[in-house]
Image: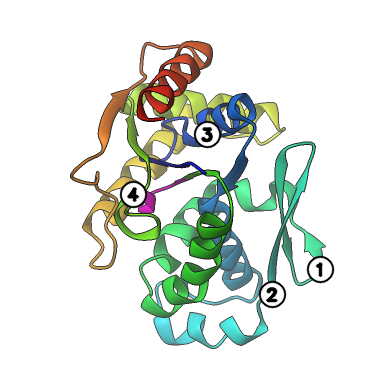
Amino acid sequence: MIRIAIDGPSGSGKSTLAKAVARELGIIYVDTGALYRTVGYFAYANGKDPHNASEVETLLPNISIELKYENGLQRVILNGEDLGDKIRMPQMSMYASAVSSIPAVREFLLEMQKRMARENSVVMDGRDIGTVIIPDADLKIFLTASNETRANRRTLELQSKGICISFEEVLNDMIERDKQDKNRDIAPAIPADDAIIFDNSAMSVEDSVKEIVRLVNERK
């Protein structure tokens, strides 16, 4: 069994890289950020302030999240509804960042994530995988890229899905989320002490995957 943690800021390419590495190694991919986006989406759909811990906490007993895997892709089911790309809207990034700083939300999702890592060989991506979720991971990567590279990637991704948004909007939202994630009191988005800092600003997905797989093979 092997467990790989890939952390990093929004737009660094974590999900794309983690999916590709999981496919290459034939193991499960877990997008933990989607779980927080799902809680954020539920708060949004119910008109709750994601920064108000009391308001968000009242929602938790009414949330049932299930992860399904179809053709190697993770699908998030909220109370029986497949949310699809609803959780990928730009405002959901800010909602996810806000609710992820609430202790009750982190506790609500923590055991689900840890159980997946205990029972399966996994590639998990998020912001605190190597520091909190699987601190004993076999390989920890902290993925980085320049702000401009990250914002450009995310803009193209959203536009390809028919979402009309400008590079400037994405960049500003990204910088604000980075600030929130790095400075939150609980599980700030920082590299684990033993993580490998991996800047992929000038690398293709294929080259990044090859390098990660090489690092995995070194540890086997």
Q: At which x and y percent is residue 113?
A: 52, 61
Helix, strand or loop status at disc 4: helix
Q: Residue tagged by mark 3? A: 18
Residue occupying the point 74% across, 49% down: 84
Mark 1 or mark 2: whose residue is earlier in sequence:
2
Viewer-side label of 3, 2: 3
Distance from Cα at disc 4 to Cα at disc 1: 30 Å
Distance from Cα at disc 1 to Cα at disc 3: 26 Å
Front residue of 54 and 109? 109
* Neighbour tally class for label 2: few under 14, some 14-19, many 20 plus, Cα within 10 Å: few
Q: Is residue 186 above or below residue 219?
A: below
Helix, strand or loop status at disc 1: loop
* Neighbour tally class for label 3: few under 14, some 14-19, many 20 plus, Cα within 10 Å: many
Which residues make up the magenta segment?
Answer: 125-129
> At label 3, which amino acid type do we have?
Ala
> At label 4, which amino acid type do we have?
Gly
19 left or right, relative to 129: right
Q: Residue tagged by mark 4? A: 130
* Neighbour tally class for label 4: few under 14, some 14-19, many 20 plus, Cα within 10 Å: many
Q: At which x and y percent is residue 175?
A: 32, 41
Marks 1/2 in contact by CB < 8 Å: the verdict is yes
Q: Is residue 50 above or below residue 20?
A: below
Q: Residue tagged by mark 1? A: 80
Mark 4 or mark 1: whose residue is earlier in sequence:
1
Mark 3 or mark 2: whose residue is earlier in sequence:
3
Q: Is residue 89 visible?
A: no
Q: Is residue 54 visible?
A: yes
Residue occupying the point 37% across, 23% down: 215
Distance from Cα at disc 3 to Cα at disc 2: 25 Å
Say which mark, if any, is on residue 64.
2
Q: At which x and y percent is residue 157?
A: 60, 29
Q: At which x and y percent is residue 153?
A: 50, 25
